[in-house]
Image (cartoon, rainbow, N blue to C red):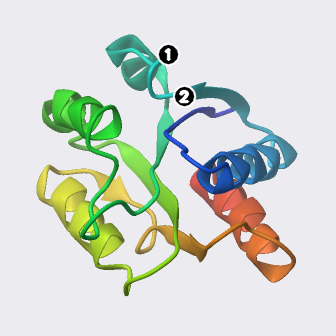
Amino acid sequence: MKNLAIIYWSGTGNTEEMAKLIEQGAINAGAKVNILTVDKATIEDFKNADVVALGSPSMGVEVIEESEMEPFVESIESLVSGKKLGLFGSYGWGTGEWMENWVERMNNCGADVLDDGLIINGMPEGADSDLCINYGKNLVK
């Protein structure tokens, strides 16, 4: 059984809903899941997980959330080498450049990032909910 930590920041609830759906998919696939907002997460939560999913919405000029998520990501950059990571988040504008940059950044640090991350425009519903659930399943395969 894989141990998945889902660590996220959400402003409007969209990324939080994605986290819950990813959790559902991982549990359905038989994983043990620890889901935390980034302000409650520790380096130990990251280290103790077999797989980690990090979630942040797109902010400002297509960047991850800057006051809580960015400092956490900076604190784990030296620890991601060889770690399977999922990156996810919601957006309301733009092209997804923030996720492309985040995936590239984590890959450059040696992480094994699943796919090209997962982005959803707004609140995940219908087929978008299914994408999140399947992302959770694939993370713990």
Callout 1: few (<14), some (14-19), or many (20+) C-alpha neighbours within 10 Å? few
Q: Which residue is mark 2?
A: 37
Rendered view: 107 above or below 93: above
Q: Nearer the viewer, residue 42 or 13?
A: 13
Label 2 crowding class (10 Å Cα cut-off): few <14, some 14-19, many 20+? Answer: some
What's the mark number on residue 40? 1
Q: Amino acid at mark 1?
A: Lys
Measured from the top left, where is residue 61 in percent x and y?
A: 24, 69
Q: Residue at x 40, y 63 (%)?
A: 58
Say whether residue 91 is left or right of residue 104: right
Up/down of 97 relative to 83, above or below: below
Q: Are marks 2 and 1 in contact (CB under 8 Å)?
A: yes
* Quarter of the view holding residue 37: top right
Residue 56 percent location from the top left of the image: 45, 51
Residue 134 or 123: which is nearer the viewer? 123
Residue 63 image-quadrant placement? bottom left
Q: With 136 as the anchor, is 92 left or right in this view?
A: left
